[in-house]
Image (cartoon, grey):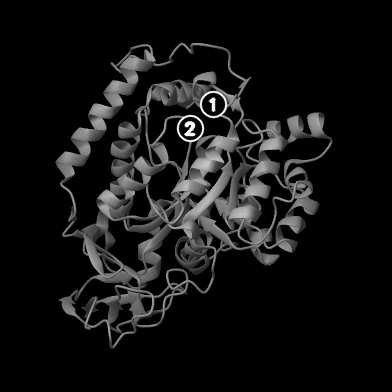
Amino acid sequence: MVTGVRLTGGTVLAADGDTGTTDVTVRTGPSAGAAEAAGDVVDVTGQLVLPGLANAHDHLRSLLPATREAETMPLPAIIERAGAAGAAATAEHYRDLTAQGAARMVLSGVTSAIDHIYPVHVPGMIEAAAAGHDRVGLRASLAVGLMDSGHPAVLQDPSVTIDDVARIADDAVPADRLFLAPVSLRQSSPDVYRAAVSAADRLGMRLYTHVAESAAEVDACLAEHGMRPVELLHSLGFLRPGTVLVHCVHLDERERQLVADTGTAVAYCPSNHLRFAKGFAPIRDLIDRGVTVGLGIDGMVDGFTEIRQAVYAQAQAAGATGVLTSAEAFRMATTAAASLASGDRADPAADPTPGAWPDAVVASPNRLELQPVADPLWTLIHRMTGTDVTDVYIGGKAVVRDGQLTRVSHDEVAERAAAATAAIASAAGVDLRPGGEHAATPPGPAGQRASSR
């Protein structure tokens, strides 16, 4: 049966940075070849055609809108405020806010993402997040957070969360798109990491966590455990092929080699690191050691921004331009990040067959300020933004056409998300008016340990 869509006449940017004019067929299934998947033909002459961008790390529910107040808030305070908002959220809020986050992804050319979701203390929250992704057509993996420390109202025994993940596997979310994800060493004790490792072995799932985000985290880990964060995770059996470590800003020589030797992957979020002054992750060194590094957006603008920020941040860290090339950064945002989501470098989304892709993005280089275009890849990375995306195909189906969502209306997504945010703010005691008091008063002490539901 003829399936898929053929994009013809455009300038094609392959994941390795090569440029050509070969037609691209966006197939509906992983086994469909170019000849089989040759259904509708779309003329994209004058446009750029690129593989779908992949987002290796994000939290697609913005429970409260960002404000200038957060510019001077330390990360622990932001985490505490997020806990207060999470305590006020319902499963329906998660669905509607995740749909907005997923819409933000696809409208800017992201076709697959790893969504790190926590807290999940209310029954149905995991399924609700999956429903939000599906509402707009985003191909999403869920990294389900496990934690036993933090805002008391959002804690549940990690074993309960693990049972919830096992229950929904291959129902709400395919099992190979689920991660067991201790949140971080700030919010998850070594016992939680041990439980995640044991459950991953039993269920055949992968592992995911934030680690080595700040020098303070390293110091605290050394003081409490006598080991640096990545060393501690290694001692717990957490480092392995399929595991994704998010951030990895502060790694010493031994930790870098441990990541490489164990086949562990890294999600790099350059704009987030700059935003919170976390430092410069040793990405060039990790890549040279053979580590797969994918780019994550992590609440920032879009995938295009992360690609160029990766190039610029690594140049700044090394004091030399070209340390991370544009082509390398583009691969980090396409095939590398997709391989983190799928866990399989042979996955079609991670390694598109020439001429027959699972996903594709069409972007217009025709804005006056982009002209003239001598090097399409350079223009894409250093000048274009997500707003230049016109059409997005996921699994052979258009989820964005002419800059508009195809499965749901923009207005519906925006209205539902605004209503959810207002309800959460009201319940959490957060004043969203300009000049209002934005910090919620938590109902109990932070740091309380979880008990069974």
Residue type (three-letter) at the residue carrying disc 2: Pro
* Callout 2 crowding tier (Cα within 10 Å): few <14, some 14–19, many ≥20: many
Drawn side of residue 453 relative to residue 198, left or right: left
Looking at this view, is 356 or 154 the one in front?
A: 154
> Which SS class for mark 1?
loop
Expressed as whole percent of the image width and height from the top left, the position of residue 279 reads 62, 41
Question: Which residue matches tag 2?
Answer: 119
Label drawn at residue 321: none
Residue 127 in percent (x, y) is at 38, 43
Observer able to see residue 248: no
For the point 66% across and 53% down, the residue is 282
Mark 1 or mark 2: whose residue is earlier in sequence: 2
Q: Please, is residue 438 above or below residue 193 in the view?
A: above
Q: Residue at x 44, y 41 (%)?
A: 59
Residue 72 on image: x %, y %: 50, 23
Q: Which residue is mark 1?
A: 155
Check the image and name the residue furthest to the right. Answer: 226
State the image quarter where residue 146 is shown: top right
Judging depth in this view, the residue of 265 and 240 nearest the camera is 240
Residues at discs 1 and 2 in contact (Cβ within 8 Å): yes
- Left or right of 285 on screen, residue 300: left
